[in-house]
Amino acid sequence: MTTIREIAAKAGYSAASVSRLLNNDPTFSISDSARNKILETAQTLNYKKNSATTHDKYNIAVIFAILPQKELEDVYYSNLRQSVVNYAKKTNMSLTFYLEISDVPVEVDGVLAIGQFQSADLELLSSYSSTCIFIDSNPDSHKFSSVQPNLESIIEQAIKLFIQDGFESIGFIGGSLWHANEIPTRLKDPRQKYIESYLRELGLLNQDLIHIGSDFSIKTGYSLGNEIITNLSRQPLPNGFMIASDLLAVGVLQAFNEHGISVPNDTAIISINDIDIVKYTSPPLTTFKIDTDQLAKTAINTLKDNIIFPVNTHKNILLDADIVYRQSFLQSHTDSFI
């Protein structure tokens, strides 16, 4: 019986591409010439689907380790959940959400994991090997595959934009991550690591301009904004702030507006996420758009490929983000904004 790998070898395309085409994956894009080549090869080799080895549905467990209150406060996570649900429907996957990893049945075809997990839970997840994909983070790239926003690239792009506009002082406003073990442990957010490293290389790092709160909420942003204002006599405003998330930026803007600080005239702001609310802040926020649809689509496609063709290696896929210019920061040569 002809196999997908034999078709792939003869047609000159990857086995994953051949499988997704022959299994009618609606999210798979391929050129007409490649499609015709694969189909002609399959016909020449008398390929027939084996119903015994083809899933009508892939049963996928989703561990969504985001507290309900956090999901309510941060639309990013509710958008990510909805994106996962939407794209699963398009790829013949049946999702079941679980609160506890120990409740996941051993016969599931794969696992999608979102959020922070305790060490014991990560040990359980590691038993799924290549059929476990983390979305938005990766607790251990040696054990797990993941699809994440390329935060390092985002930070570097933002700093370059500030420098191109002649900014001599650049600040950062961020939050903290917390390890989910029984004794909460405060972790340095990657965005903070990247900006400190990048500014240090450029000789522009000023630790007095790095402001870190306990989380990424509007409330924390408001508190940090007020702290910055209180300390203005000791530490003047930088030319611009990179802010780790839109929610933090909304809180900072609220504090700045209350005290008459004009953005971008007194200090500019670039943020991350592009949630809907930032179109309506005063001023509207310039921000990097994290595409939750693309995160979900890439994670689900990667998981499906790994289910069909099990691998021993782990993939860490980083997705770039486009900047959306609004009034909180406009390049000097940019004439329009959204």
Image (cartoon, grey):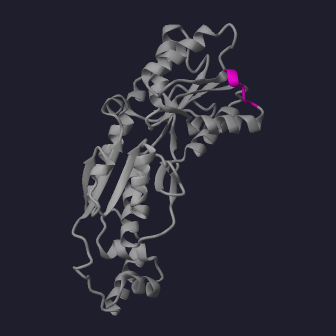
Residue 282 in sight: no
Numbered circles on residues, count: 0
Image quadrant where residue 81 sits: top left
Characterize the magenta stretch by its predominant secondary structure. Answer: loop
Q: Residue at position x 25%, y 71% from top?
A: 55
**Residue 183 place in picture, x, y as percent:** 47, 32
Depth check, front residue: 207 or 274 = 207
Image quadrant where residue 309 sits: bottom left
Q: Is residue 283 above or below residue 198?
A: above
**Residue 237 place in picture, x, y as percent:** 65, 16
- The span picked out in magenta is 204-208
Q: Residue at position x 54%, y 16% from top?
A: 225
Is 207 one of the magenta-colored residues?
A: yes
Image quadrant where residue 307 sits: bottom left
Q: Quadrant of the C terminus?
A: top left
Q: Residue at position x 36%, y 65% from top?
A: 304
